[in-house]
Image (cartoon, rainbow, N blue to C red):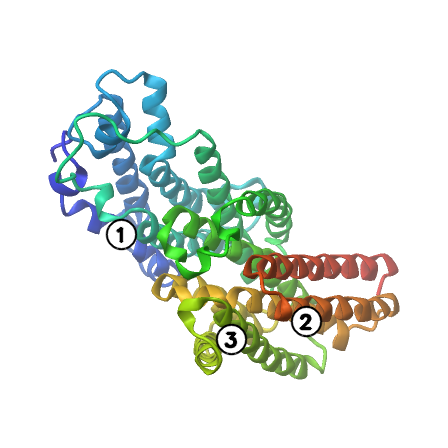
Amino acid sequence: MLFCTMLGESAPWYLPAVFLSVFLWAFAVQIAPALSSRPWLRRLYHAAPPVLIGGMVLHRAQALLTLDQQHNEVALFLGSSSPVVERLQVLLTGYGGIEGALFALVVFALAAPSLPSLRGVHESTRDFVRHRMMMHNGVWAALLMLLLLPSEAHLAMANPPMQPTVSPMAWSMFGSILLFTLLVMMAGEMMTASAHIAVNNETRLLFNRAMMKTVVALVIAWALLFQSEVFSPSWWSRPASDAPLHAALLVAVYTTLVVGFHAPASLNDSRFHHHPRQVRSLTVSLALTAVILLALSARYAHRVDIYGEGAVALLTGWRISASLMLLAGLMMLLPSLGYDAAHRPEAWWFRVGMLFVLAVGIMIDASLWLAVPGLMFAASLHVLLPWASESKHPSVKRFIWVMGGAWLVGFVSVLNLNSLELGLFVSVGVLGLCAAFSWWAERQRMLDGT
C-alpha cells in the first residue's frame, strides 16, 4: 500500500473491506456464537473493524502531519509551512475526526462488557452485551460511513488548488463530534440493557447510568441544534444538503426516542407485564400511532413546497406513515421466530422497528423527516397509556389527566403552527415531559410500596 497518496487510490480494496467488516457486525448476534468453535476466526471477526478503521485514521494522520501535498485536506486547508497545531485542528475537525468517531464506536462495542456497571455479572451477560453492542454500533458505523465519508474523502481531486482555499473548522467541531459519538454509544447501552432486563436484573445498573448520562448530553446536543440551520424554514426542503448537520440531527432524534420512548416504555413493560389489559393498551397505542403519524406527516408535507399541497400532501403523509407502520409491524412477528427476550416482546420489537426504520429510511428517502414530530407525539402516548389504563396508583391516576391535557394542547398547537421548526421543538418537549412523568410515577409507586 502506498501511503503517500489518497487511500482510495493507493488501496481501492481497503474501503470496501472496512464497510464489509463493519456491516457484518450487524449480524453479530448470529455470527459471533456460530464462530465459538473457531477461535481464530472469531478473533478476526471482532478485530477487523477496529484494525481497519484504525488504519484509515493513521493514514490520514500521516498525510496531514507530514503535509503530503497530494492529500486533499492538505491542499484545501494547509499550506507547505502550516504549524503543528493547525494540522491537528484539520485532523480532528475534518474527516479524521469522523473516522476517529467510527474507531471509538467499534472499540467501545468490544470494551462494553468491562464497564464498571457490569462488574460482577455472569459471563453469559457479558457476551450478551458485547454482541448486542457490536450489532448496534456496527449498524451506526455503517450508516455514518455512508452519510459522512463520500468518495471525495478518499480520492484525489482532479484539480487541487495551488494554495489553501478553505479555513480549518473551529475546534468546537471536535467537541460536537465527541458529543454525538457519545450519544450513539449511550443509546446502544440502553438498547442492549433493555433487551436483557427480562432475563435478569444484571443490566439494570448499566441501563440507569446510561440514561442519566444521555439526558445531560441530549440537553447540550439539542441546544446546539437549535442554533443551527435545522431551525430555519429552508432546511426541510433540502435536509441532506449538509451531511454533518443531517447526521447530527439523526443521532439526536434517535437518541431522544431511545431515552424518552424506548427506555420508559421498556420499564413500563416490566412493571405491568402481568396486567390483563396489556393487549388493549398495545392495540390502542398502535391505532393512535397510525392516526398521529398520518395527521402530522401530511400537515408537515403541506408546509414544505416540494411535497405539494392538499391531496398531494395527504398522499405523501399516507405513504410515510404506512411505510413506518408496515415495516415496524413486520418486526412484531420476530417473537414468533424465538426473539422474545422481553416482558412484552411485540411492543418491544415495534419500538425497535420504529427506531430502525427511521434511522435507515431517512438515508433512502429524506421525506421521512416529516414523520419525526408525529413519531415524537406517538411515542409520548406509548409512555402514558400504560399508566392510564394499567396503573392503580391513586396519585398517578389523578395526575395522568393533567399529562393527557398537556399532550392534547401540544398536539393541537403543532397541527396549527405554521413553523416547522417550532413544531419540532414542541414535539421534543412533549416527549421529554411524558418521559419525566413516567420516572416520577415510578418513584411515587416505589415510595408508597405499591
Question: What quarter of the picture does the N terminus occupy?
Answer: top left
**Rendered image quadrant of residue 377:** bottom right
| Disc 3 to disc 2, C-alpha distance | 14 Å
The residue identified by callout 2 is: 412
Residue type at the position of mark 3: Ala
Q: Residue 331 at x, y = what percent?
A: 46, 75
Side of 223 where 132 appears, left or right: left
Answer above or below: position of 128 versus 373: above
Q: Is residue 33 left or right of residue 285?
A: left
What is the three-letter code of the residue carrying label 2?
Val
Does residue 40 appear to the left or right of 140 in the view shown? left
In the rendered image, the quadrant that contains the C terminus is bottom right
Name the kind of residue labelled 1 in the image. Answer: Phe
| Picture layout, residue 93 above or below residue 25 | above
Is residue 148 at all visible to an observer of this figure? yes
Task: From the image, tell me which residue sits under label 3.
Answer: 298
Does residue 111 sit above or below 83 in this rendering?
A: below
Disc 1 from disc 3: Cα separation: 36 Å
Going from N to C along the chain, the mark reached first, 1 or 2, is 1
1 or 3: tag closer to the N-terminus:
1
Q: Which residue is mark 1?
A: 19
The residue carrying pointer 2 sits among few (fewer than 14), some (14 to 19) or many (20 or more) residues within 10 Å by Cα, namely few
**Pointer 1 local density, CA inside 10 Å: few below 14, some 14–19, many at least 20:** some
Distance between the alpha carbons at the discs numbered 1 and 2: 44 Å
Residue at 48 percent across and 69 percent down: it is 353
